[in-house]
Amino acid sequence: MSNQQATYVTIDLTDYNQGKVVIPDTYYNPNIEPLPKRVKTWTWINFFTIWAGMVHNIPAFQLAGLLTFEFGAPLTLFIIGFAFSTLLIALYLNGHMGAKWGIPYPSSVRPMFGIKGARVPTIIRAFSALFWFAVETYVGGTIVDAVISIFYPAWQSLSSNVIGMSLHLAISVFIFWALNVMVLFRGMNEVKDFELIAGPLVLIILGGLLLYSFHLTNGIGPLFSIKGYEKATLSNVILAISAMAGFWATLVLNISDFTRFSRTQKDQLIGQTIGLPIMSMLFTFISVGITSTTIYLYHIPSSEAINYVNPVNIMYLFTDNPYLALLVGISLIIATVSVNVAANIVSPVYDLISLFPKRLDSWAKSAIVSAILSFLYVPWLWYNNAGSIENALGIIGSGLGSVAGIMIADYWILNKTEISLIDLFKPDGKYWYTNGYSVDALLAMTVGFAIPIMGFLISQLSFLYDYGWYLALFSSLTIYVLLRINRESVKYSKKQN
């Protein structure tokens, strides 16, 4: 659409001391403009409950269990604590942008990538978020299926094949998918209210289950009964830390989707500090504890223990007490809806609105389209391969790390947290660069991503892949700063001549 064909809108930026401006709506949608300060009402409690709802999820439970079998419980707790504590720094740095300027992720990448170029990191983020939404939806469907099967065994007789799943599982996956859409459909306030209840509720239920497990085993000894089967070398510990960083690398990019609602910087900092590393450590302790005590209680041989990092399998051990199984099942369903909505589908909703501001002009339309697109990942065909998940974490983390590095470099190092809000939507403005694209940002992102991926593709360079998210972030950050400094130097020389 050309500027002559576009209609015009007035953006009121007086809350940010940038006045009122009339612009063409070619690259504008009200869902991605700066929020008025009167609607920025989230406190640290809201950020705490958002994270409390997100850290309680089955893939995190399984990863904690897998690491426990690999390294033992104490080192597992250290790996997860270290990974998430370093992530917190990046979350705060990118979250600052949303809290200060009231903009979501698709708008926040325009200053560094260009108005059109921002589509690239927006698509990358949407792609990874929908990947995780698909994974969590499938996992949530297996929980629904398990709960129904425990109380109604004939349910599993619905065995007809539906796109690679048995009919009973396909119905369960659709039920869980619909629950997610119901929570998401009405917008961010609905998400906030749901997380306010879901996060603490899941923690209470699973914490209670852990205490009950300790009661049955007469103490916490079984928590440390599982010993690591692999020698903990520096290389494989770093690889594990990098993989865990990749687990939440998605939120590092689009955390401004949430912090744009923050009353103050202090609220988002305190809420995230309590919510991510502290709550993750607590959930990891619960995950490892439940897994260990279950294996101890049911005398599961070590050859089969790896199968019980999946809490759905643990549920089936409770069939002699179906009401306990039901309690576990309900808590897991709530937990998985909680993480799926907040972590995995909010971002694609904003992303698709930004990519198609005219066609997907409302939150509801974008939410439905995002949820439907997630089925294209068909996770039921590959999810149970542990290697697939670990590789996906590493590759996704590397790609997202390269974008995060550029965002931090541009916002903090080069522009000292200043943004020209009107130019986020203005063709031929400050962020138009070369026909809407920033060559520097796209080049830095590509190289930053390629460096660790070479380690994935070439065995002799595997050490590069081991550092994944961290290497991609620092590589792209450094390259971008150098490219921008060089460009400014060339401009200055031309002016002098």
Image: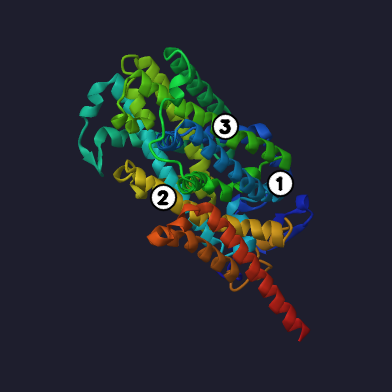
Q: Quadrant of the C terminus?
A: bottom right
Asked if 396 appears above or below 59 in the picture, the reply is: below
Name the front one of labels 2 and 1.
2
Asked if 202 appears above or below 348 in the picture, the reply is: above
Type of amino acid under label 2:
Ala
Q: Residue at x 40, y 61 (%)?
A: 460
Q: Front-most of 348 and 311?
A: 311
CA–CA distance in space, label 2 to label 1: 38 Å
Across and down, in percent, residue 334 comes to: 46, 29
- Callout 1: helix, strand or loop? loop
Asked if 78 appears above or below 406 in the picture, the reply is: above
Across and down, in percent, residue 387 comes to: 35, 46
Q: How many marks?
A: 3
Q: As drawn, is 260 to the left or to the right of 466?
A: right
Q: Do we see residue 480 in this rendering?
A: yes
Of label 2 and label 1, which has the lower sequence position?
1
Q: Which residue is mark 1?
A: 36
Q: Which residue is mark 2?
A: 392
- Give the quadrant of residue 273: top right
